[in-house]
Image (cartoon, rainbow, N blue to C red):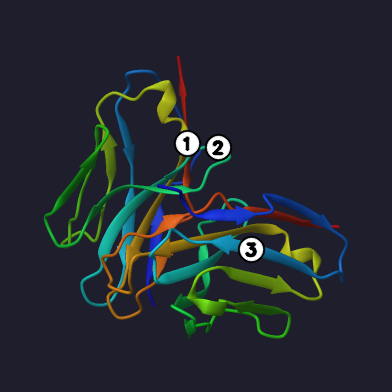
Amino acid sequence: EAGVVQSPRYKIIEKKQPVAFWCNPISGHNTLYWYLQNLGQGPELLIRYENEEAVDDSQLPKDRFSAERLKGVDSTLKIQPAELGDSAVYLCASSLDERGGSEQYFGPGTRLTVT
Amino acid sequence: GNSVTQMEGPVTLSEEAFLTINCTYTATGYPSLFWYVQYPGEGLQLLLKATKADDKGSNKGFEATYRKETTSFHLEKGSVQVSDSAVYFCALLSGSARQLTFGSGTQLTVLP
C-alpha cells in the first residue's frame, strides 16, 4: 500500500515569492492534516480536513497561507508571499476517519528554504 | 491548553545500552498518548500508543506505560541498536480537539 505522498521534497525560493506544496493521502483516508515543523521542534497543526471540508484551520495564518482539498482527495497548501520565517518542513498526514484514536500516517515532508 | 514536555537531547548511547526518554504531559480529560519516530529523510512513523491509564504500548522492543498519576509516558528499550538512531517524538491526542500535540523531539544516536 502506498503511503502519503508529498511533492516537492525540497524547495528553495526567494522571499515574497509564492510556493505551493502538494499532498496525496493514503487511498480511502477521509481526514487530511497539514503540519508545520520548525527545526528542532515537533510538528504543529496548520489545518485539518474531513473530506473536502476544512474543520479546523484556527492555526493557519490566513493572511498568507491557503489550502484546498478539492474532491476530498489530494490537497494543496500555498504560501503567498513567502517570508524568511516560513523556512521549515511542511508535513502532510492522513487518517482513516476523524475518530480520536485513528492513526495518522505522515508523508516525508517538503523542506522549504526561503532566502 | 495541552502540552508535551520531552527530555532534551541529543542522547548518545553505545549499542546494547538501556534507553529511557522521559515524557510528561498536560491535558484536559483523558488523552491518548503516542511515541512517533522519525528516521533521517523520512516521515514520522507511529512507534507505539496507549489510550488509557495503565496501558502499556510496545513495539520493536520499545515500551511505554501511560501513568496518569504522574502524567508521564516514558519511552524505554532494554538494548538499543545502531538502527534505532532517529528522532523520537512524544505526542498526545485530545479527544475533544482531535489534534496531535507533539513534544520537541529527542535525537538518539546509537554508536557501534
Q: Nearer the viewer, mark 1 or mark 3?
A: 3
Q: Are marks 1 and 3 in contact (CB under 8 Å)?
A: no
Mark 1 or mark 2: name the one nearer the start of the chain. 2
Label 3: element kind: strand
> Which mark is in front, 3 or 2?
3
Residue type (three-letter) at the residue carrying disc 2: Pro
Q: Chain of mark 3?
A: A
Looking at the rendered structure, which numbered label has been put on residue B86? 1
- The structure residue drawn at horizontal position 66% and vertical position 79%, both measured from the top left corner, is A66
State the image quarter where residue B25 is shown: bottom left
The percent coordinates of residue A37 (x first, y second) are 58, 59
Q: Which mark is residue A76?
A: none
**A10 vs B93: above or below:** above
User: Residue at left 52%, top 78%?
Assistant: A71
Q: Residue furthest top?
A: B112
- Return the chain for callout 1: B
Residue at label 2?
B40
| Residue A14: image location, x then y, percent | 88, 61
Q: Are marks 1 and 2 in contact (CB under 8 Å)?
A: yes
Quarter of the C terminus of chain B within the rendering: top left
B55, A81: nearer the viewer: A81
On the image, numbered disc 3 is attached to which residue?
A22
Bin the neighbour count of mark 1 within 10 Å (Cα to Cα): few under 14, some 14-19, many 20 and up.
some
Circles 1 and 2 on the same subunit: yes
Q: Secondary structure at mark 2?
A: loop
At horizontal 32% and vertical 57% (from top left) the residue drawn is B24
